[in-house]
Amino acid sequence: MGYGFLSKVIPLAAVLLPLSLPAAPLEAVPAVQSSIATQATMLDAVWAGERMVAVGDHGIVLLSDDHGKNFRQASSVPLSTPLTGVSFVDARRGWAVGHWGAILVTTDGGESWKLQRLSSAEDRPLFAVHFFNARQGVAVGLWALVLTTEDGGQTWTEQHLQPPPGSKKADLNLMGLFADRQGKLYATGEHGQVLLSEDQGQSWSYLDTGYEGTLWSGAALADGSLLLGGQRGTLLQGSAKGGDFRKLPMQSKGSVTSIAVSGARVLAVGLDGLMLVSGDAGHSFEERQSSEGLSLTAALLGPDGSPVLFSRRGVVPEHP
């Protein structure tokens, strides 16, 4: 469940620059129905049963019931601020997060959404969300913000992280979340940091990746290894035990914004049209280019292994 590099950096910079200035309280304004909704920047996408759900700028949520051939806008979203992450536990129940610490919930497959959380006095955005089941979930974001819920999002508890090795405080921006088959949860962040939780986000440890840049995305592969996407064409592969991550060779220097896995099929996408495709569970990758070199912000794999791509210009036309 990755969040696009460009679409993350721009709002992130806007938040970081005026640190000494209090934000004006946010008034929740519903997302506007738009005839060009499919052209909005999409920041994350997931499967909800047989439906694709994508979230992005202006509170726009897109739905597809034909494996990405056609998308339509959700009928009711209570916020028009950027939505940055989305997670579903089945075909109907899902959560989305975004700016102002917003958390939304749906019980009808993304058709309509209700507000569960909003920090209207401080724009401390959430960048990613993951639910293990209908009750237990985790959301992460700016300045090491980690929130957990045990009641389906009715209440959220902030978890305080220990500082990473060599640091005096935990203030990393946490960019992505993904889980493996054993239910272990991983958060990707700045300075090459990956955090691991084995108790649904209640406590965390740090993995040594040997990388210094920001890790924007990640996924667990079929063999249990981790695939991590970073800056300037960085794709790392290694085990959760840490210490043995290696950088996979590639020609592209585009940052890796999103990774999708479906069985042996693996797709990593990023800036400048970066596409890395594997048909052998991540053992080898073929470099490709998206149409017009569009910077890609999210991706899904269809049932037949074909990619469905999203960018700063919205849904990308069908790609071979």
Image (spheres, rainbow, N blue to C red):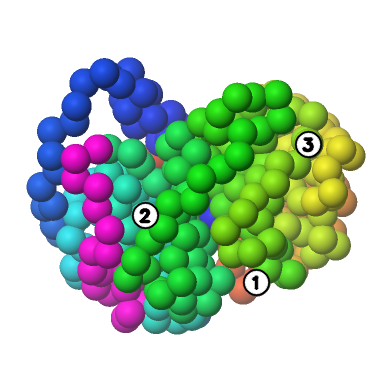
In the image, residue 275 above or below residue 191: below
* Residue 256 x/y as whole percent: 61, 37
Q: Which mark is residue 208?
A: 3
Side of 67 where 282 appears, left or right: right
The residue at 57%/52% (across/down) is 177
In the image, residue 65 above or below residue 167: below
- 290 is within the stretch colored magenta: no
Q: Residues within 10 Å of mark 1 (few under 14, many from 20)?
A: few
Q: Which mark is residue 304?
A: 1
The residue at 10%/47% (across/down) is 27
Q: Nearer the viewer, residue 264 or 217?
A: 217
Answer with mark 2 or mark 3, whichever residue precedes in sequence: 2
* Residue 132 x/y as whole percent: 56, 71
* Residue 154 x/y as whole percent: 32, 70
- 108 is within the stretch colored magenta: yes
Q: Which residue is mark 2?
A: 97
Side of 131 where 263 appears, left or right: right
Answer with mark 2 or mark 1, whichever residue precedes in sequence: 2
In the image, residue 101 above or below residue 17: below
* Residue 131 x/y as whole percent: 51, 68
